[in-house]
Amino acid sequence: MKSFVKENEDSWLQFVQRTFFLPIAEFHRRYDTVIVCFDNYGNVPVFKSIEQNRRVAGGSAFQFKAGDTLPSRPCNSEIWKQALLNRSFKSNIISLITSLMATEYVPPRRGTTLVIDFVNSTRIDYKTKGQTRVILEEMKAMGESDVKFMRYIPLFGDMCVDSIDSDVLLIAALFVARNAYAGNLYVRRYKTRLPPAVSAGKKRKLAAEAQGKTPVVTPDRKKLEYEIIHVNLLLKVLQARMHEFSATLEPLKNGPEKGQEGEIASCEAPDTAHLTAMLSFLVLLSGSDYSRKLPRIGAKSLWDNMDIIVPAMQVCTSYQENIFKVHEERTMNLLLATLYARIFPKHAMLSVVTTAPLHTGRLENVLFQLQRSQLSAKTKLDLPTVQSLTTMLHNIEWVVNYWAVENGDPICPVDGSCGFKLENNRVVFSDAHS
């Protein structure tokens, strides 16, 4: 999706050589094994169709359907991005790329291995004389390339995953924790940009004003930079921070029912795998390809309120035999009710008793107060409902468990149990109205 076409590229081979052969060869100069993974849309979870439909909702002038023949050369740069939104076209492109890769690619040195993972997984070993090729039969069909790297770690050992998709960092962290992986796992990604205290443009403006000159403000150039994250180390740092918050449960003892309070008081500290699943849950509250974000609460607010979120997650979720479970009622009335009351302290209080219709818990109470408050009409319109939050929790639970499938496809029920249903032969969120 991040590729582009040069005007002087008159053939698919030229495009593939620049886009794939050159970076693979660069990796092969330093590493013995390179694994290239592609999405296999025949096995991508059907729930992804919601995000796919959103991406193409605006329509496109580019038309390509199954059975159509690829053009003789790559599309011009103006329509290339639109073309890649077409799954039939993109599948044909990937098929062409993998065929050329298997037949035309030559590594810069021998004694190296190339694995091509698309519909199946092909291992090519470049020996001193000639090469050998074998289909890795133990590798089951999988859809998204994001999750494919996990199954190669037992085969090849320590790995650096080159991916700009932010989900990969969470998937890698879950793998390390779930398997108590003692080796080293890295992720190469776009560098995290920290906001400067004073931008370069602002500095130039201030310097010009100090000299009595009229400032000429030019936008700061953003150079594309990468960073390599040591997943094991990052996980230890984040878990240590989360352990600090999980050591106290006091913020949650000011309102739950007695039975819940007793459970909170006796709750044991989560193990590493559970803690990492909780971390994924926290990040997924900001949204993903399979779930919507928590309305009116951004990522910064979530991190700023970890003192109540982490203890709440500790008692609202469980992790047994590699299965992550979100306890819906506890999450609603302990985590989400407390969080929304803190985010909007002037408009909702947990201790206030209202005459909210059908009031059965603290979350309904808080949402009722917010809808009757002085908040703007736009903010009130954006606020969640119990139904939308229930759907979101089911979605997140499914995503975390999907990321634990290391070889094969996840189960994708459309009965609403995972927050998805089938309507007019299309997958939609469970709370969607006809």
Image (spheres, rainbow, N blue to C red):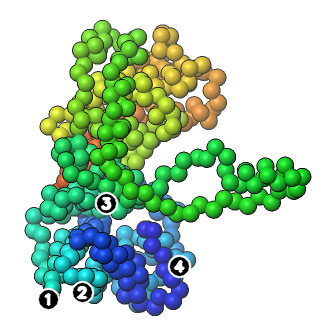
Comparing labels 1 and 3, the label whose residue is closer to the camera:
1
The percent position of residue 139, horizontal first and vertical second, equals 14, 64
The percent position of residue 396, horizontal first and vertical second, equals 33, 41
Residue at 21% from the left image edge and 76% from the top image edge: 112
Using the numbered discs, state the Cα–Cα distance from disc 4 to disc 1 in whole angstroms: 40 Å
Residue type pointed to by label 2: Thr
Using the numbered discs, state the Cα–Cα distance from disc 2 to disc 4 in whole angstroms: 27 Å
Choose between 96 and 218: the one closer to the eye: 218
Q: Residue 77 carries which label?
A: 4
Q: What element carries label 4?
A: helix
Q: Residue at label 1?
A: 129
Q: Which of marks 1 and 2 is nearer the N terminus?
A: 2
Q: What element carries label 2?
A: helix
Q: Earlier in the sequence, mark 1 or mark 3?
A: 1
Disc 4 and disc 3 in contact, CB within 8 angstroms: no
Q: Which of marks 2 and 3 is nearer the N terminus?
A: 2
Q: Which part of the image, by quadrant, shows the N terminus?
A: bottom left
Q: Earlier in the sequence, mark 2 or mark 4?
A: 4
Give the answer, above or below, for where 421 lies relative to 255: below
Q: What element carries label 3?
A: strand
